[in-house]
Every structure is written in structure tokens, then in C-alpha cells.
Image (cartoon, rainbow, N blue to C red):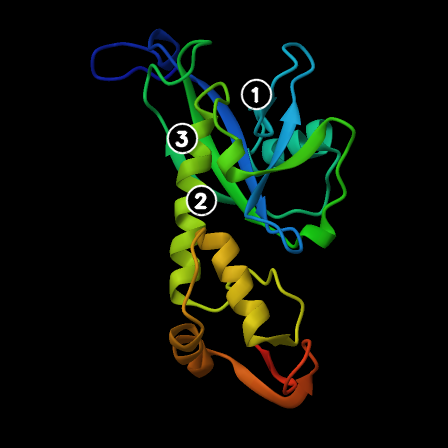
Amino acid sequence: MTEYRDASGKRLADYPRPSVAVDTAVLTVPVGGPLSVLQVRDQVDGDWRLPGTFVHEGERLADAVLRSLRAKAGMTGLAPRQLHVFDEPGRDSRGWVLSVAHLDVVPAASLSLGDDARLVPVGDAAGMVHGHDDILGFAVAQLRADHRGAPDPHGLLPSPFTMSALRGLHEAVLGERLLPDSFRRAMVPMVTATGKRAAEGPGKPAALYVR
């Protein structure tokens, strides 16, 4: 096969190429807790960061993502989706590294963490290396945008749920208090009442809904 050359006579190997990495923001809301992110501890430097890896030759991006989650966080069964490409040439202190960021949003109860993995509130995750703060910020912004337009769009709550539980989840994700009456009016048209009720402390039992 004739080696490819472009109009200037150069081969692909004649052009400088960045290293390609995949980094994943795994977000969740622990019961009664704030929006949190999965971090892994680097075996060399000992710092905490998002799970990620360099893409191997001939490897698909999706396979590299799953490999990094399995090897660094001890996690399987996730299905991250591509979020954004971070391509600022000076973003990584190691050199020219293009990161294809991914996002997965999962119920906290489904997470089984390895020894070198932890969940931390997103507000406490600043100061990560290799531009991971920017990746996390982008992922959180996307998640919050999703929650402003739909009830529990990623299925973090078990069904059925009460309206107060749904509001609590949205408050955790958005990082702000929401007016109960305004929230109810916005959400009721987008959920389905089961016709059943559940006791939620003193007072009238609360109606149960499903997405």
C-alpha cells in the first residue's frame, strides 16, 4: 500500500500529535448528602483526581474509559457518555494532552468503591491536577442544566418518590434551596401520581409519584 502523503508531501507521522486521554466525572447524590464526585488516588503521586487514562494504540475511547474505571476505581457496569473535548494545548502540565471527558450519573447505592476510590462533595474537589477541575465544573454545569428542566432526569431516586424527596434531590444537585410550592407546580405536570401515599413524619401522608 502506498504511504499517504498530503498536498505538501508530508506523512501523518510528520505532524506533531497530542497524547489523548479520557477522564470521567462520575456524579451522584448520597442519601441526605450533597452532590458528590468519584475521585481516585494516584498510585505515584498520592493525590486525588478523576479516574482517567491515556488511550492505548488501537483502543476505542469507550473501552479506555471502562478500563480506567475498572483499574483505578474498581468499578464495572457503568455507561459513561462523552461530555466534551478539552483541547487547550497548555491545559496539562505533563505536555500536550487532549482529554475526551466523559460523564456518568448514578445512584449512590449502586456504587461499590475500591480501596483507592472515594466520594467527595463537588465543592471540596478543587485543586485536582491535569485540568480535572475544569472537567468537573463542566460536568456539574451539565448535570444542573438537566435538572432545571426535568424531574430527576438521571434516575437517582428510587421510584415511587414523594415530592419532598424529589425536591431534596434537586436542591442537592443545584446547591440551592427551592420554594416547595413553586417546585411542585413545575414538577407535577412531568411526573405521574401513583394514587398511593406514604407517611413522611407527622401530618398527612404524602402522595407518591413516578417519572
Question: Residue at label 1?
Answer: 57
Dot 1 or dot 2: first in sequence order is 1
Residue in front for this viewpoint, 207 or 44: 207
Residue at horizontal 52 percent and vertical 29 percent from the top: 22
User: Residue reaching furthest left?
Assistant: 8
Number of the label disc, if any, that sits on residue 134: 3
Query: How many numbered badges does the structure rendering display?
Result: 3
Q: Position of residue 107 (x, y in %)?
A: 65, 55
Helix, strand or loop at mark 3: helix
Residue at horizontal 56 percent and vertical 33 percent from the top: 60
Hey, which quadrant is residue 163 in on the image?
bottom right
Helix, strand or loop at mark 2: helix
The answer to whether residue 196 is seen in the rendering is yes
Give the crowd class for mark 2: few <14, some 14-19, many >=20 residues within 10 Å. Answer: many
Question: Residue at label 2?
Answer: 140
Residue at horizontal 57 percent and vertical 87 percent from the top: 193
Q: Quadrant of the C terminus?
A: bottom right
Give the crowd class for mark 1: few <14, some 14-19, many >=20 residues within 10 Å. Answer: few
Dot 3 or dot 1: first in sequence order is 1
Using the numbered discs, state the Cα–Cα distance from disc 3 to disc 1 in whole angstroms: 26 Å
Marks 3 & 1, CB-CB < 8 Å contact: no
